[in-house]
Image (cartoon, helix red, strand yellow):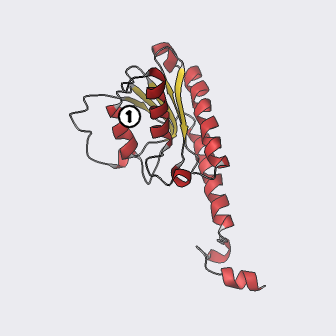
Amino acid sequence: MEEHFSATNNSFYMNEAFTQAFKAVAADEVPVGAIVVSSNGTIIGRGYNQVESKKNQLAHAECIAIQNGTKNIDDWRLDGCILYVTLEPCRMCMGLIELSRISKLIYGANSPLFGFQLDNEQSSWVYKNDVVIRGGVGAEKSQLILKQFFQKKRNKKGEYQEAGLRGNQGCADAKAK
């Protein structure tokens, strides 16, 4: 499996995860994409955020990719698999990663609000799965996509950054002009 963990392959697979993130953008979802790669290098699962469209907080990119991966190999155990995701997983997704027995996690940007590393509690000893974790692969691209997405969302809501205005302050004044 180490041959599928090289910088070149990480770049290739992370680009596949970015393809999923762009599907999220097209669906007006937070742009996070994920893929599951088997020990032989085959992509067995793909997913992108669909929380808003499915109205389900379980529809994170990681959850969908893992669900598709387990369906494709007809086993809930993803031993030897690598998960590539464009943003650091949240605690919920990290629990699923551990329970699914994924061997390696490669992610792009850190998540300063929801990332699993913010949680000081260690994983349950019951999981007994030491996931090898590497962050920062494609981080700049991931950060840029997220930043552009949220800027566009703020602009659609009529938020103003000019003159120190935040939120919807000043919207009525701006519309009246």
Relative depth, front residue between 52 and 30: 52
Residue 30 is situated, as x and y percent measured from the top left of the image, at 57, 51
Q: Is residue 32 above or below residue 165?
A: above
Seen as rendered, the residue at the extreme left is: 125
Task: Please indicate whether residue 94 sits to the left or right of residue 146 in the image.
Answer: left
Quadrant position of residue 166: bottom right
Look at mark 1 in the image and give the residue it sits on: 97
**Residue for point 57% across, 31% down:** 14
**Residue for point 49% across, 34% down:** 65
Amino acid type, mark 1 = Ile
Instruction: Give the number of marks.
Output: 1
Relative depth, front residue between 4 and 67: 67
Relative depth, front residue between 133 and 73: 73
**Residue for point 62% across, 31% down:** 15
Q: In which quarter of the image is the N terminus?
A: top left
Task: Please indicate whether residue 174 sits to the left or right of residue 139 in the image.
Answer: right
Q: Identify the secondary structure beneath mark 1.
A: helix
**Residue for point 21% across, 33% down:** 126
Residue 21 is situated, as x and y percent measured from the top left of the image, at 60, 41
Seen as rendered, the residue at the extreme right is: 177
Relative depth, front residue between 60 and 108: 60
Q: Is residue 93 above or below residue 146?
A: above
Task: Please indicate whether residue 173 sits to the left or right of residue 79 in the image.
Answer: right
Residue 170 is situated, as x and y percent measured from the top left of the image, at 65, 81
Q: In which quarter of the image is the C terminus?
A: bottom right
Q: How crowded is mark 1: few (under 14 residues within 10 Å), some or many (20 or more)?
A: many
Residue 171 is situated, as x and y percent measured from the top left of the image, at 67, 79
